[in-house]
Amino acid sequence: MQELEDSTGPLKESSVKYPYQPEEYLLQVNDIIEVNIKTTDPDLNRLLSSTFNDQNGNQMAGGGQSAGDVFFMNGYSLDEQGQIELPLIGEVKLDGMTIDEAKVVVENEVKKYVKEGEYFVRVRLGGVRFSALGEFNSSGKFTILQNRVTIFEAIAFAGDLSRLAKRNEVLLVRQYPDGTQIHKIDLLDRDLLTTEFYWLKPNDLIYAEPMKVREIGAGSSLVETLTLLTTSITAITLILTLVNN
């Protein structure tokens, strides 16, 4: 009880506050977006819908893929020309635009068929897709259905880094409209929170390099490493004994 009475509170220390520095994402080829258009005209809504029913009554997607999450099923993928094809409206070029700019472009197309105030348009990214390779506990390709994802959220989604990962030298391969660039990130540096690399972007690839112990074939834990070293020493001793005899 004396310890409780002398308590100064649960908070021991707080760091300085790091301001966010997110960059607005510009749509690129192969991005998948959701475009939802609703009007006051039910017949027009059916024409503008991104889904339709096949002859067996199964719901199918126009502009999506046959498998994957809901955005793959009902979303629109930007083709090699950076365009999507909407029902009734046709092809719309959106690459190089922010989501807000893409929404304005789609709204301008809808205005050709609907009066002002009689429609609703929503455009958003089909989640954040990324790849995690190297020293991850669960490497692979992942999709997080959020608008914004931090690099630490992505690492957690991939099962965290293994014990042998170089946390101060993680490679981030990022696609830009004019090419691909590799960035080496120090996850242990607090200043990371104030950079553009704190926020993951669609199609990012995170590669966790192994430490030297992995490169020389050591185990992933202390027990495995000691076992490997003991076995190696025993083998070397046996070889030297045979040579000397």
Image: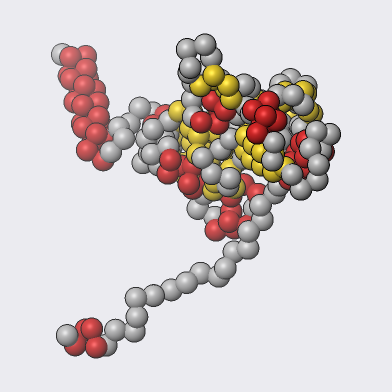
Please tell me in which quadrant of the rendered image residue 97 appears. Answer: top right
Q: Residue at x 42, y 37 (%)?
A: 158
Residue situated furthest top in the rendering? 55
Please tell me in which quadrant of the rendered image residue 179 appears. Answer: top right
Indicate how the structure is coloured in the image: secondary structure
Residue 188 seen: yes
Q: Which residue is drawn at 79% across and 29% down?
A: 93
- Camera-side residue: 54 or 161? 54
Q: Is residue 22 left or right of residue 211?
A: right
- Percent of width and height locating residue 191: 59, 58
Question: Total of numbered circles in the picture?
Answer: 0
Q: Is residue 37 left or right of residue 106?
A: left
- Percent of width and height locating residue 166: 46, 41
Please tell me in which quadrant of the rendered image residue 85 appears. Answer: top right
- Percent of width and height locating residue 71: 55, 31
Point out the image quarter for the N terminus: bottom left
Is 93 rendered above or below residue 108? above
Q: Which residue is drawn at 37% across and 35% down?
A: 137
Residue 171 seen: no
Q: Which residue is drawn at 48% across and 32% down?
A: 142
Point out the image quarter for the C terminus: top left
- Camera-side residue: 38 or 206? 38
- Percent of width and height locating residue 38: 66, 38
- Camera-side residue: 67 or 132? 67
